[in-house]
Amino acid sequence: MSSATPLQAGTAPVLLVGVDFGLPHFDAELEELGLLAQTAGMQPVARITCKRKAPDAALFVGSGKADEIRALAQMHGAVEVLFDQSLSPAQQRNLERHIELPVNDRTLLILEIFAQRARSHEGKLQVELAKLQYVSTRLVRRWSHLERQTGGIGARGGPGEKQIELDRRMIGDAIKRTRERLVKVKRQRSTQRRQRERRDTFNISLVGYTNAGKSTLFNALVKARAYAADQLFATLDTTTRQLYLADAGRSVSLSDTVGFIRDLPHGLVDAFQATLQEAIDADLLLHVVDASNADFPEQMAQVERVLHEIGAADIPQILVFNKLDALPPERRPPDLQDEYEVAGHLLPRLFVSARSGEGLDNLRQALSTKVLATQLDMTPGDAVELPDAMP
């Protein structure tokens, strides 16, 4: 079973490919892959999906479907093919030979977006490390010259050392240097956190799926001007500001972190440990959810998986269901404050609109309640008693 549907045309046209292996999170419309492609500066011109029980070892989709992909790409003038799943180096190389076009996967697409968006020194280092780790497994993808041997003795390698072996060694050295530089950055962050701890700062981190509105909420709460846009991965570098809570009579530290996404490359999870450390060391997580997205349960599950990977799964959470203003009247909740079950635990939930400001007073009161409870040595992880809803 397959489908081929034209999408919006434009410059740098690409063909989107998705394979349904029967997993519950399969994106049949390839909507998220299309948004990723547009965020990276590409323009999807067509899409094609198919069902398989398991990936084909050589071509991932099988030779017949690969022929169909090649014909569809030629028909729509696509210059590149993007797969919604991760491809092995051999599958990627075989597909490029068969389709006669560059073939890339979701992992590289996310890495490219991160490379474009990173602004801080730390963010650039993290992206560089993740890309080096990715490229190191794909040196034999397109470059036949890498199989040639390099003669002689000297800086370019020992006698008879193949070019590919030399390149792998150079990339290995670059990975080692980048990791060492990141260790220094992480040490600096640790010093900054210790300074905040000495000041008895209560740390809150915003986490959530990409494009859930974290940066818009961050700006609304602290009246900052952090970059916010209706696109994937608008924010990569952690931004921290002070938020004054009048009901608690004190300020807290609020951090906006990078958004998570389905199938976030493990290399990025590892590389962004320094940035995500803000979430790991938080006293409270505000898990921001796009309430207007029908797939929000799956998005929440993806965020929980990443939090578990980085060791932040046991930190107390408040669920913030954002984009209340985008909900149609029939989907608007009767109560703006309730509880929602996550992994067998009931968590406090508040509905807000970061754009219009609705519900933000309730959120500030909930944060004040949590801070005051912590000051009274309330057990971390106890349920937050939400205040009565504001009129």
Image (cartoon, rainbow, N blue to C red):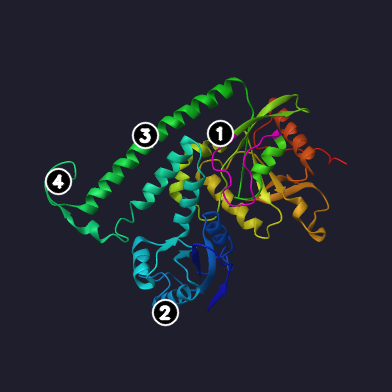
What segment is highlighted magenta in the picture?
A: 222-239
Q: Give, as a three-letter code, the residue at label 3.
A: Glu
Q: Quadrant of the C terminus?
A: top right
Name which quarter of the figure residue 5 lies in: bottom right
Q: Which sits earlier in the primary sequence, circle 2 or circle 3? A: 2
> In this figure, which residue is indicated by the disc labeled 2?
64
Q: Nearer the viewer, mark 2 or mark 1?
A: 2
Seen in the picture, residue 199 relative to 207 is either above or below; the reply is above
Depth order, front residue of 324/371:
324
Would you name the residue on which mark 4 appears? Answer: 158
| Contact between labelled residues 1 and 4, with CB atoms less than 8 Å apart | no
Residue 335 included in the magenta stretch of the image:
no
Q: Is residue 118 visible?
A: yes
Q: CA distance from mark 2 to mark 1?
A: 51 Å
Coordinates of residue 98 in the picture (x, y in percent):
36, 73
Amino acid on which the number 2 mark rests in the picture: Gly
Q: Is label 3 in a helix, a strand or a loop?
A: helix
Looking at the rendered structure, the secondary structure element under dot 4 is loop
Question: How busy is the neighbourhood of tag 2: few (under 14 within 10 Å), some, or many (20 plus)?
Answer: few
Q: Which residue corresponds to mark 3?
A: 180
Label 1: how many Cα within 10 Å (few below 14, some 14–19, many 20+):
some
Q: Which mark is residue 136?
A: none
